[in-house]
Image: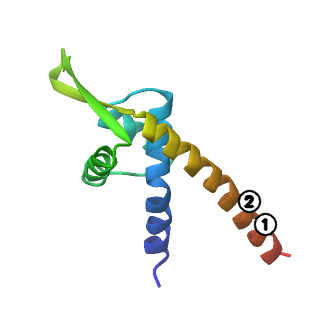
Amino acid sequence: MKLENTKAQMRKGVLEFCILSILKVKEAYPSEIIVALKEAKLIVVEGTLYPLLTRLKNAGLLSYRWEESLSGPPRKYYKLTEMGEDFLGELSGTWKELNTAVNKISKNSTK
């Protein structure tokens, strides 16, 4: 089993949660989302992000608007919908429970 594959799968598992968390703070266009993820050491490429944004939008968790740009083509800004905020709230609770459980197990295994 390759370590890099396992690490990539772990990152993918939390990517949706992280994107929704970024958009809870403020609406953003994809390049801003990628920068925020990279700053958090979650390396993501556009080929991964765009399909995920589309899936979240189609699920009703995100909406978007177009804004003209002075430096190029119009930009698509994404934001959470009310349903997205509710969904993120549920994910936050699940994340806290999961984080607590993993920390407990991993601390016990190092004794």
x and y, in percent, of residue 85 in the image: 49, 37
Is 7 situated left or right of 55 in this image?
Answer: right
Relative vertical location of residue 93 with respect to residue 26 in this rendering, above or below: below
Instruction: Name the residue rendered at 41%, 34% in the picture.
Output: 80
Identify which amino acid the numbered label 2 is placed on. Answer: Thr
Whether residues under marks 2 and 1 lie with C-beta atoms below 8 angstroms apart, the answer is: yes
- Looking at this view, name the residue that lies furthest to the bottom: 1
Is 107 situated left or right of 35 in this image?
Answer: right
Identify which amino acid the numbered label 1 is placed on. Answer: Lys
x and y, in percent, of residue 108 in the image: 82, 73
Residue closest to the eye, 73 or 51? 51
Residue closest to the eye, 30 or 41? 30
Q: Secondary structure at mark 1?
A: helix
Which of the 4 quarters of the picture holds residue 83?
A: top left
Residue closest to the eye, 48 or 2? 48
Q: Secondary structure at mark 2?
A: helix
Residue closest to the eye, 106 or 27? 27
Q: Which residue is mark 1?
A: 104
Q: Can residue 39 be spotted in the picture?
A: no
Q: Residues within 10 Å of mark 2 (few under 14, many from 20)?
A: few
x and y, in percent, of residue 22 in the image: 47, 36
Q: Can residue 21 be spotted in the picture?
A: yes
x and y, in percent, of residue 46 in the image: 27, 48
Instruction: Name the residue rendered at 52%, 41% in the picture.
Output: 86
Is 87 situated left or right of 54 in this image?
Answer: right
- Looking at this view, name the residue that lies furthest to the right: 111
Colour scheme of the picture: rainbow
Q: How far apart are labels 2 and 1 at the CA level?
A: 6 Å
Q: Which residue is mark 2?
A: 100
